[in-house]
Image: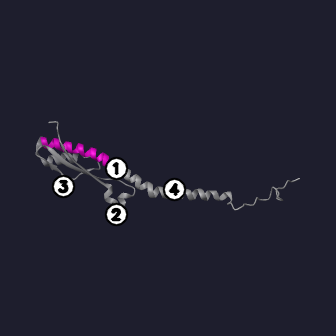
Amino acid sequence: MLRTLRGLRPADPIPHRGRRPSGDAGGLVVGWAVKLLIVFAVVGIPVIDGVRIAATHLTESDDVSSVADKASQVWQATHSASAALQAAEGAAPSGETVVTATFKTFPNGAAYVELRQTVSTILIGHIGPLKKLAVVTEGTTVTDQSS
């Protein structure tokens, strides 16, 4: 004989008591995944851009020191500001440019150099008022001590 539970036979569907059928659980997972994706886009992308910009500031300060040192060496050897500027431009790493308007040489053999680089960003460099944050400029004065 078939055993019944509260008058229902095993073949009858069990009524749901205010719960969703288990087939809707996939929609719940997709909903959370979309929310996480939106949170990542709103918070994560600017953070990634900020880290890129900060890392560029660090490398740019090292690069500008070596470029200014090269310019100072040439300035002390030739006493030609244009030769020192050309040496600085030649020593600048790829993607970085020497700001010629601020380049200076001094009688004591020192050279002041500024390097400028535009950071490739996902978001910050493409928004009007924030574009300037993606342009990194570092400057330093170096006197070559090797002579």
Tell me which residue sits at (57%, 57%) in the image: 30
Residue type pointed to by label 2: Gly
Q: Earlier in the sequence, mark 1 or mark 3?
A: 1
Residue type pointed to by label 1: Ala
Q: Which residue is identified by label 1?
A: 54
Q: Measured along the vertical axis of the image, is residue 101 above or below residue 70?
A: below
Q: Which residue is identified by label 4?
A: 36
Q: Which residues are magenta?
A: 56-76
| Depth check, front residue: 50 or 67 | 50
Return the x and y of residue 116 as percentages of the image width and height: 26, 52
* Mark 2 element type: helix
Tell me which residue sits at (13%, 43%) in the image: 109
Q: Nearer the viewer, mark 1 or mark 2?
A: 1
Real-space CA distance between mark 4 and mark 1, rounded to the nearest whole angstrom = 26 Å
Q: Residue extending furthest top?
A: 146
In the rendering, which numbered label is found on residue 128? 2
Real-space CA distance between mark 1 and mark 3, rounded to the nearest whole angstrom = 25 Å
